[in-house]
Image (cartoon, coloured by chain):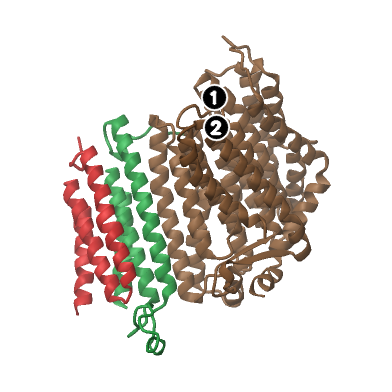
Amino acid sequence: MYSFLSIPIFLAAGFLIPFIGSSNAKNSRRIALIASFLAIVVSLFEIPSVLLNKISVKYMSGWMAPYGISVAVDAFSLVFIILASVIGFLVVLYSKKYITSWSVEYYTLLMLLFTGVMGVLHAGDLFNLFVFFEILSIASYALTAFHKNKKSLEGAIKYLILGSFTASFMLLGIAIIYGIAGTLNMADLAGTLGAGLSTSTAIAFGLIFAALAFKSAVVPFHYLKSDILEVTIPPVGAFFASIVSATGIYAIMRLYFTVFNAGFLTHHILILLGVMSIILGSLMALKQKDIMRLLAYSAIAQVGFVVLAFGMGAFVSESYIAGIYHLINIVFIDALLFFCAGVLVLKHKTTNMEHLQGVGTVNPVLSYGFLIGALANAGVPLTNGFASKWLIYVASIKVSPILTIITVVASAITLAYSLKAYSVLFLSNAKNPKTIKLDGTIIFPIVFLCIICIALGIFYTAGISISEIATKALLNNKPYILGVLG
Amino acid sequence: MFVNYIAALLICIGIYTVLAKENLLKKIIGFSIFSNGIHLLLISIGYRVSGVAPIITDIKTTGLSLFVDPLPQAFVLTSIVIDLSITALAVAIIIQVHKKYKTISAKKLDNLRG
Amino acid sequence: MIFEFLLLVAIILAIAAVEVKDMLYAVLILGGLDLVVAVLFYLMAAPDIAITQIVVTAVFGTFIYVVAVNRTGRKEVIE
C-alpha cells in the first residue's frame, strides 16, 4: 500500500513548513512542491497492485477489519487519488505569483487541505471519513478568508456557519448508523445493511448526503461554488472547483454503491438534482458580469451532468462510465479555466468583466488556453468534453427524450456563455492593455492542462477504458468486501 | 430513554439559534449548544444499563463486569476537539469582520449577491 | 433522580444562553451548560470524556468566547 503514504507526507510537510519556513519564506514553497511531487509518485506506484488484486488494503496497527481502522484503495479511488495529487501539484506551482506575503501560513493551510482530501479518498470506514472531512473543511474555511478583504471575510464566515453545521449533521447520521448496525467499517456495513433497508437508515444516509453534497456543490447545496469561488484567490478557487467537488461526489458514490448497495430508489432524486444543477448553472451563468462567478456557475452545471449520468445508471448501465469519464474531464477543464482567468484577475485586481475587456489579447498562451477550456466546456469535438457528453446524450435518449433535450440545450447555452467570456476577455479591443509577462510557474500548468484536454479528447478510448475499470470496481462491491474483511 | 429527548431538544435549540438570531457570535453560541446536544446523544447511544466505564482498573476483576460501548466515546472525543478548532477559527474571522465592517450583524453583510 | 434534574437544568441554561441580550452573560451561561453536560457525561460512565469536556469547552472555549466579546462589544443588537 504505497498511496496511503501521501497522508503522512502532506501532514509532515504541513508541520515542517512553519518551522523551516519562518526563517526563509521561500523554503515553505519548496517543501510544498517536494511534498506534492512525492504524493504523485506514491500514487502512481499504487497502480500495479490495484490492477492485479482489484483492491489494496492496509490495516492500521495490525488490528483486523471489523475491529480496527482499515485503509482501502480500489480502482475507483485510485482514479481520484491520481487526479487529486496531479492537480494539487499544479496548484502549488501556480500559486507562486499570488502569494507574496504570508506564504508560510498559506502553504501550511494548503498542505492541510491536501491531507484532508487524500484522507477522504483513502477512507475505509466512516469514522476516518468524518475526521478527514473535517480537516478538509477547516482548512478550506481558513483559505477562503485568506486575504482578509471585506468580501472574503463575509464569504468565509457564512461558509463556516453553514459548513460546520452540515458536518455536524454528518456526525449525527454516522451516530444513527452506528446505533443501527454496531459497526462503522464500510465493508462490514455493506454486509449488514444491504439486506434490509429501513426508515432510520434512509434518514442517516440523507443526513450524510447533505454534508457531502454541500462540499460537492450540487443544487440546492451549491453555496460553495456560487458564492465562495468569487472571493477566494484563483489557485485556491481552482482547487475547490475541481478537486474538493470531485471528492464530495466520490464520497457520495462510495456510500451509495459500496455501503448501501444502491438498495433504495434514489435514482430519481439523483436525476432530479442533476437536472436542477444543469438548468440553474447554465441559466445563471448567462447573466453574470463577474468572470469568477460565471466560471463557478459553469462548474455547477458540469457537476450536474455528472450527477445526472450517475442517476441514469439505474436504467442504462453504460451511463456510469459516462459519469466517471465526465467527472475526470471537468476536473481538468475547470482547473484550466480558473488558471487562465486567474492571471487576468491577478494583474488587474478586479473580477468584473466590464473592466476586464480585452485585457487578455496581449498574451497568446492565456488566449489559447482559455479557448481550449471554453470549447471543451461546451463539448466541441476533438476535446475531452465532447466524448463524455456524447455518452451522456446517448444514455439519456434511452431514458427519456426530455432529458436529451435539456442536456443538448444546456450544452448550447454553455457554448454561448463560454464564448461570451472568451470574446469579452480575449477578443475585444482593450482600453489600455498592460503586457502580462508570464513565467514558467504559470505557463507550465496551463500548457499541461491544455495538452491533457486535447489528448483525452483524441484518445477517448483510453479515457473510456479507465472509466470502465473504475465503474466495475464501483458497482460490484463483493471484491471490496472480500478484500477488506479477508 | 429520557436523555435522548433532551439531547434532541438541545439540538433543536441550537438550530433555532443559528437560524433566528442575527448576531454572528450568537450563531456560534448556537453551534456550541448544538454540538453539546449531539455529544449527549452519542454517549447515550453507547450507554448500557449498569455498565461501568471502559477503563481497565484492576486486571483480575475487570473482565467480569459489563462495559459501556467505547466507540461512541472515541467519536465524542474527536468531535469535541474539532468543535473547539471550529469555534476558534470562527471567533478569529468574526473579530476581523468587526474590524472591517464595524458590525457583527448578519443582516448588514450583504455584498455577495446573484 | 439527580440525573433527570441535571437534564432539566441543561435545558434551562441552553434557553437562557440564547435569549439573554448581554453577550458576556450569554457566554458565561454557555460555560455553565458545558459544565452540566460534563457532569452528565460522568454520570453516564464516561469519566475521560467528562475531563476532556471540562478542559476543552468549559475552560478553553469560554476563554475564546470572552476574548471575542472583549473585541466586539457586549450588546447583542446594535441599531
Quadrant in the picture for the C terminus of chain A: bottom right
Residue kind at label 1, given as amino acid type: Val
**Residue A92 shows which numbered tag?**
none
Chain assigned brown: A
Residue most toward the top? A432
Residue A179, given in percent of the width and then of the height, sits at 45, 74
Q: Is A296 situated left or right of A409 in this image?
A: left
The correct choice, above or below, for A103 with respect to A258 in the image is above
Task: Tell which of B45 and A134 is nearer to you.
Answer: A134
Residue kind at label 2, given as amino acid type: Pro
Q: Which residue is mark 2?
A: A234
Do the dots labelled 2 and 1 sit on one chain?
yes
Q: How many marks?
A: 2
Q: CA distance from mark 2 to mark 1?
A: 8 Å
Q: Is A36 situated left or right of B61 in this image?
A: right
Give the mark nearer the N terminus: 2 vs 1: 2
**Residue A345 shows which numbered tag?**
1
Chain assigned red: C
Residue A238, given in percent of the width and then of the height, sits at 58, 37
Quadrant in the picture for the N terminus of chain A: bottom right
Q: Are marks 2 and 1 in contact (CB under 8 Å)?
A: yes
The correct choice, above or below, for A94 with respect to A119 in the image is above
**Which residue is pictured at 28% across the width and 53% down the height?**
C61
What hue represents chain B? Answer: green
**Which residue is pictured at 53% across the width and 52% down the height?**
A213
Residue C47, given in percent of the width and then of the height, sits at 31, 72
Does residue A217 appear in this view?
Answer: no
Does residue B8 appear in this view?
Answer: yes
**Which residue is pictured at 73% across the width and 37% down the height?**
A379
The correct choice, above or below, for A51 with respect to B111 in the image is below
